[in-house]
Image (tube, helix red, strand yellow):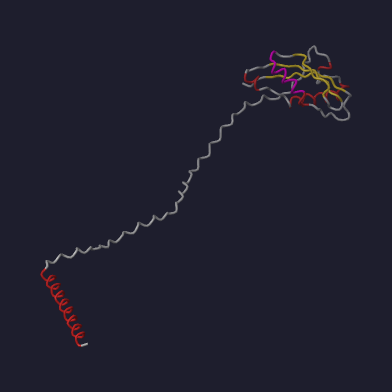
Amino acid sequence: MTIRKTDFISAAVFVSAVLLHLLIITVAFMHFSPRQPLPAQTRFVMHSIPKPPAPPVARPLQKPKPKPIASKPAPAPLPVPEEPPLPAQDETLPETEDAPPSDEPFVENAGDSLLVDFKALIVQKIAENKIYPKAARKHNQEGNVTVSIVVLKSGKLAQAEIVNPCGYKFLNEAALASVRSAAPFYLGESAPDQIELTVTLEYRLEG
């Protein structure tokens, strides 16, 4: 029993001695071995990341101010052409020489004075409505046109025809138009059933 304890102690001492020698050898080796440089430390540099530029602020579009429109001056009125003065509307009396009594409204017997008055009214009304065409004036046309007419008691124009024309178509047509535009003739209740007479319209340019 004593031998076993002694063997156990001797073994423990031996193991301790071996471990001590290993420790000494390890320390000596580390002390005398060349030092290896430590690996370079990696340095991290923090760079600040620039902020992205702010998006441009959209400005509201300004509407262009309307330019004041200069008022145009009112155009001057065009001159109104003056028409040549109308010739005096003289009552044209039928000729009294070698003419039948019915063609002479102003030359009648004393007993027919009332009929003369009716014929005078008809002639006056025609003279007031006398037409002188511009085309005839432009071409300096003049002349006399004799028209035979029949007027009823009611004043209605029953007949109108040219019995003595002039050499110009415009004046002949104007004479008939003048007689027709003068109708109806207001003669009154005392007028005869019909009145026949001839009227000569004279066309003359003034000057």
Residue 125 among those drawn in magenta? no
Dividing the picture into quadrants, the one containing residue 130 is top right
Residue 174 among those drawn in magenta? yes
Q: Position of residue 24 (x, y in %)?
A: 13, 75
Residue beneath the point at 88% across and 30% down = 189
Q: Quadrant of the N terminus?
A: bottom left
Q: Main secondary structure of the magenta part?
A: helix
Dividing the picture into quadrants, the one containing residue 40 is bottom left
Drawn side of residue 96 relative to residue 207, left or right: right
Drawn side of residue 7 relative to residue 196, left or right: left
201 or 26, which is in the foreground?
26
Dividing the picture into quadrants, the one containing residue 46 is bottom left
139 or 11, which is in the foreground?
11
In this picture, which residue range is highlighted in magenta? 167-179
Residue furthest to the top: 98
Q: Position of residue 105 (x, y in %)?
A: 81, 20
Q: Position of residue 27 (x, y in %)?
A: 14, 73
Q: Quadrant of the C terminus?
A: top right
Residue furthest to the left: 32
